[in-house]
Amino acid sequence: MTSLLPALAAACLLAGCAAAPAPADTRDQFMATLQGMCGQRFEGALSYAIDPNSEFADKKISTEVVCTADGVRMPVQVGENRSRTWIFTRPAAGLELRHDHRHPDGTPDAVTMYGGMAKEGGTARSQAFLADAYTARLVPGAETNVWTVSLSQDGKVLTYRLDRHDKPRAEFVLKRVGG
């Protein structure tokens, strides 16, 4: 059998056989989708919150997609508050979402840089991120957090959803501004 392998390989080369392409990694596709949105602005509001008195209630929420060498940043403005940024990166371990919270002077908030890695099964337009151990230690009760970030097929609607203990806690629906 071993003497047949070189002959089969040569025959395949002559016949133009090609190796099956590796399946596309949806985490790379999602990052490419975000990077294709660089410079775009989205505005909207809280569409659902478990707490009707949420700090997000009745406030305009907006973000802009900012691409950097390290990933994608989305500064989030809630009313006049500009303290939040969603950060998407693609480390070797997978696809990561972090929530960077800052005071007006730029110093980090006590509750910042929480988030986690994307779980299996995402798509080029939607990924779900599971809370990591750091988040579980930092935010009591957040050990089961799942943040899902989705973009509509036409690229005009960005949805950010938070689930905790398998129940929805909040959802923002933001529409692309200008086009």
Image (tube, helix red, strand yellow):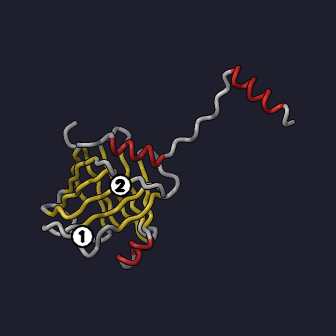
Q: Earlier in the sequence, mark 1 or mark 2?
A: 1
Q: Quadrant of residue 77?
A: bottom left
Residue at the disc numbered 2: 88
Type of the residue with mark 1: Ser
Tell me if residue 143 comes above or below residue 129 in the rendering: below
Q: Residue at x 21, y 67 (%)?
A: 102
Where does the image place residue 96, in percent across and percent down from the top left? 40, 58
Q: Left or right of 5: which side holds 68?
A: left
Q: Left or right of 147: which side holds 156?
A: left
Tell me if residue 170 comes above or below residue 125 in the rendering: below
Give how far apart the Cα atoms at labels 1 and 2 are: 25 Å
Q: Are marks 1 and 2 in contact (CB under 8 Å)?
A: no
On residue 134, the disc is none
Q: The N terminus appears in which quarter of the rendering? A: top right
Of residue 55 and residue 146, the one placed in the foreground of this image is 146
Counting every numbered tag in the picture gives 2
Q: Residue at x 38, y 40 (%)?
A: 153
Tell me the SS state at disc 2: strand
Q: Residue at x 27, y 43 (%)?
A: 38
Where does the image place residue 6, in percent across and percent down from the top left? 78, 30
Where does the image place residue 116, in percent across and percent down from the top left? 41, 64
Of residue 167 and residue 105, the one placed in the foreground of this image is 105
Q: Residue at x 42, y 67 (%)?
A: 131
Q: Nearer the viewer, mark 1 or mark 2?
A: 2
Q: Residues within 10 Å of mark 1 (few under 14, many from 20)?
A: few
Tell me if residue 121 comes above or below residue 24 in the rendering: below
Q: Residues within 10 Å of mark 2 (few under 14, many from 20)?
A: many
Q: Left or right of 81: which side holds 35?
A: right
Type of the residue with mark 2: Phe
Tell me if residue 112 comes above or below residue 82 in the rendering: below
Residue at the disc numbered 1: 54
